[in-house]
Image: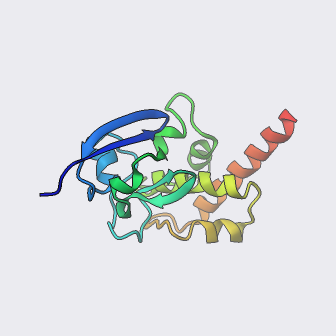
Amino acid sequence: MTDKMHIKMTVNGQAQEFLAEPRELLIHTLRERLDITGPHIGCETSHCGACTVTMNGKSVKSCTVFVAQANGSDVTTIEGLGTPDNLHVLQMAFKEHHGLQCGFCTPGMITRASKLLEENPSPTEEEVRFGMAGNLCRCTGYQNIVKSILAAAAEMNAAKEAAE
């Protein structure tokens, strides 16, 4: 049995503190310990991206991150991007442009897309496809996902220009 470790992290802006085995995966910590169920457990091998979160400003697949590695980190999941009453622009774009079907991959897609648009606010279609390559969808064929991300980028850029 592994000794438990004192873990501190900020998840979606809220400080979290608990004891956990260092080898516990971040996805299990989020879903089972913190009841943050947006990130999904898909492949558990980092191939599908359904578990994608932002950790310390980088997109990571939480099925391959030990909670010990996340100690002291700032983690954002889909729940940290918007609320049911105040959706993030990407959430609205996915809804309006049919960027989802079953919804299983959507939290990871939107979380990754959020980071992609932060890194590149005006991506081309090719850059979106490349930037999202680590997130798989078995339903949509990707066209509406790409369309949603490009629409969100355009809306975010228009809002930024209007504010200036």
| Residue at 63% in and 69% down | 129
- Considering the image in quadrants, where does the C terminus appear? top right
State whether residue 149 is above or below residue 19. Answer: below
User: Colour mode?
Assistant: rainbow
| Residue at 57% in and 49% down | 94
Q: How many numbered marks, from 0 up? A: 0
Residue sitting farthest toward the left: 1
- Left or right? Give the position of 164 relative to 41: right
- Considering the image in quadrants, where does the N terminus appear? bottom left
| Relative image position of residue 127 (x, y in whole percent) | 69, 68
From this viewpoint, is residue 76 visible?
no
Between 37 and 56, the one nearer to me in the picture:
56
| Relative image position of residue 155 (x, y in whole percent) | 74, 44
| Residue at 43% in and 52% down | 103
| Residue at 54% in and 36% down | 82
Between 92 and 159, the one nearer to me in the picture:
159
Residue sitting farthest toward the top: 85
**Residue 160, quarter of picture:** top right
From this viewpoint, is residue 145 visible?
yes
| Relative image position of residue 16 (x, y in whole percent) | 37, 36
State whether residue 8 is above or below residue 109. Answer: above
| Relative image position of residue 101 (x, y in whole percent) | 46, 55
- Left or right? Give the position of 67 relative to 78: left
State whether residue 59 is above or below residue 88. Answer: below
